[in-house]
Image (cartoon, grey):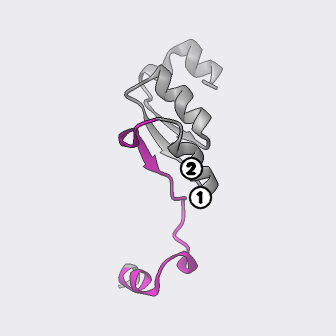
Amino acid sequence: MINPISNRMNYYNFFDYYCIHTGTQARYYYDRFPGIMLSVFARDHKEYEDIAISGVPWRNMIAYVGPDIIESDLPLEIWTVIND
């Protein structure tokens, strides 16, 4: 799971942030690098639960929300504030 180039050049010692999609990935990186910050991509409740049961502390995770804000995903009140 660790990129072979990163592994060979020890980049993971300098780059302590990874984007993960499963609880297995979260556990894998946390077990190897306990101080790591994980960007978590969970699109639905099932994926969220998979991450939640991984045992990785929430303090080691941030939510990946995507590159764009989609108007239909936000309540009208929030969208109005963003556009003002």
Give neighbour class at mark 2: few <14, some 14-19, many 20+ (Cα, 10 Å).
few
List the residue tagged with mark 1: 45
Type of residue at label 1?
His
Front in this rendered view, residue 69 or 52: 52
**Quadrant that contains the N terminus:** top right
Q: Is disc 1 surrounded by few (<14), some (14 to 19) or many (20+) residues within 10 Å? A: few
Q: Examine the rendering and report whether any part of residue 41 can be seen.
A: no
Q: Which residues are magenta?
A: 56-81
Residue 27 appears in view? yes
Residue visible at 54% across and 14% down in the picture:
9
The answer for how far apart the CA atoms under marks 1 and 2 are is 6 Å
In the image: residue 79, left or right of residue 26: left
Q: In the rendered structure, are the residues bearing label 1 and label 2 in contact, judged by CB atoms less than 8 Å apart?
A: yes
Tell me the residue that label 2 is attached to: 49
Please state the total of marks drawn on the protein image: 2
Q: Residue at x 61, y 59 (%)?
A: 44
- The C terminus lies in which quarter of the figure? bottom left
Quarter assignment of residue 66: bottom right
Residue 78: % across, % down: 40, 80
Q: Nearer the viewer, residue 46 or 6?
A: 46
Residue displayed at 63% across by 54% down: 46
Above or below residue 21? Residue 73 is below
Q: Is residue 54 above or below residue 5?
A: below
Picture coordinates of residue 42, whole percent (x, y): 58, 53
- Residue 82 as seen in the image, left or right of residue 27: left
